[in-house]
Image (spheres, helix red, strand yellow):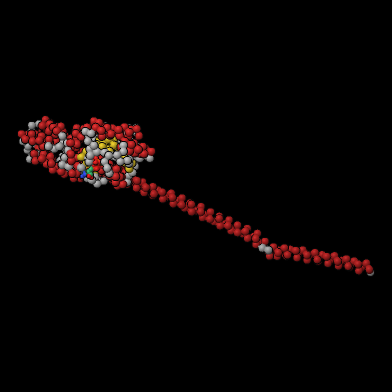
Amino acid sequence: MEYVYLGLAVVAIIALLWVLRRASDSSKANTAASVRERIGLEEAEGAPRRKRRREIEAEQQRAAEEAQRREEEARAKKAKPKKKEVEEEEEEEEVEAAKPEAEEAAEEAADAEAKAAFKEGLTKTRGGFVARLGKLFGRKKFDPAQLDQLEEVLISADIGPRTADRIFQAVKKGLSKNELESSDQIWKQIRKTSREILAVETPPLALDKKPFVLLVLGVNGAGKTTTIGKLAKKWTDEGKKVLLAAGDTFRAAATEQLEVWGDRAKVPVVKGKPKGDPSSVVFEAVKRGVDEGFDVVICDTAGRLQTDQGLMDELKKIRRVCDKALPGAPHETWMVLDATTGQNAISQANKFKADLEVTGIILTKLDGSSKGGVVLGICDQLKLPVRFVGVGEKIGDLRPFDSAAFLEALYADASVGEAA
Ligand SMILES: Nc1nc2c(ncn2[C@@H]2O[C@H](COP(=O)(O)OP(=O)(O)OP(=O)(O)O)[C@@H](O)[C@H]2O)c(=O)[nH]1
Ligand SMILES: [Mg+2]
């Protein structure tokens, strides 16, 4: 009996142990899940995964949209550039077509402006010897017996006796007996000869030199400093970097006068000491022009008479010093002549030219002169090109010399309509 009880007890214990083990297993599983849930592990690991998946999906969506957008753009571009290209081509064609037109219009405007300026500037000259010629050849038919009067008028024209004779002989010997009876033919011959006289060889300005050095000289009060101011403005407006040299250390206030023009043209001025050596001012200016990359250096000088040997030698020294500072400089030496002085200007220039290798002329004060015909004498006797003409005291009153416009203006009242 004892053995039966013992057996039952063992079975009961085994059954109990089995039940306990099952209970323990299920409790372990529940606890782990709840703990993981409680500490948020499930959330912490699951959320990013879900988030990444969402992000990946969003990225894929964006990529698809981007690809579609690019494709649409590419399609649109294929159609658009054609239109754009056509428009651009059309625009280019229009610009090309408009360019010569614009240039032509600008040239015409400049021509008209030059003609008007010359016409205005030569008013007094036209009222002088040209008016007297007009009286002589006023009628269609001319009496050759009056030919001597033509010589007289030409001599009084202040163009120099040699030039007066050249024109006179061209009429007298160049025309037939019949032609000499026609005022129109005589006017034609005067114009033709004047045109030949003005056809002086004019080499292009070497403004491409770096810097282009210009020496300006002439007698007292001719208009050197004023012209330098006008040139500085003109070339600055054309985009050049201009420097001025106050080489007139002789006359009190000459440097200040140049500085005033420098301010107006907005260009710097190299100056020296009063009564100092003008050569050293010019040397310093040319050196600075080279070192600082100026395009143009214009050197003013003191006014002097061609008869003053000391002052003429000073100009020679200035020239030598220019060449030391920049071999080849000065590239041009321009003589400023006052148109109101008439043929005196020609004899002055002859002496300067012989001593100083003058390469060009600037004729000032044409606006106030009745002796504008002196241009004919200058070109005929000096064989120097007239580069510019001063037609007033203001900074813009400078015109490039245009022989055709000049002759047209000079003989504007002549009876023959044909352009000179
Ligand atoms: N009407 C007129 N006057 C001018 C012209 N050019 C210069 N002048 C005047 O002429 C006078 C003399 O001009 P400046 O430039 O001082 O002459 P300059 O040759 O430098 O004189 P110096 O330095 O004394 O030798 C001034 O009163 C200028 O206004 C011009 O084209 N027309
Ligand atoms: Mg001066």
Residue 260 seen by the camera:
yes
Query: Which residue lies most toward the right here?
Result: 1
Query: What residue is at 7 percent from the left and 37 percent from the top?
Result: 142
Q: Quadrant of the N terminus?
A: bottom right
- Between 352 and 380, which is closer to the camera in this rendering? 352
- Between 288 and 17, which is closer to the camera in this rendering? 288
- Between 4 and 192, which is closer to the camera in this rendering? 192
Query: What residue is at 39 percent from the left and 49 percent from the top?
Result: 84
Q: Quadrant of the C terminus?
A: top left
Query: What residue is at 24 percent from the left and 32 percent from the top?
Result: 309
Where residue 232 appears, as percent x and y from the top left, is 30, 43
Where residue 95 appears, as percent x and y from the top left, is 32, 46
Q: Quadrant of residue 283?
A: top left
- Side (left or right) of 362 relative to 172: right
Q: Quadrant of residue 313?
A: top left
- Side (left or right) of 356 relative to 43: left
Query: Which residue lies most toward the front here?
Result: 275
Where residue 2 appears, as percent x and y from the top left, is 94, 68
Query: What residue is at 22 percent from the left and 36 percent from the top?
Result: 305
Where residue 288 appears, as percent x and y from the top left, is 36, 39
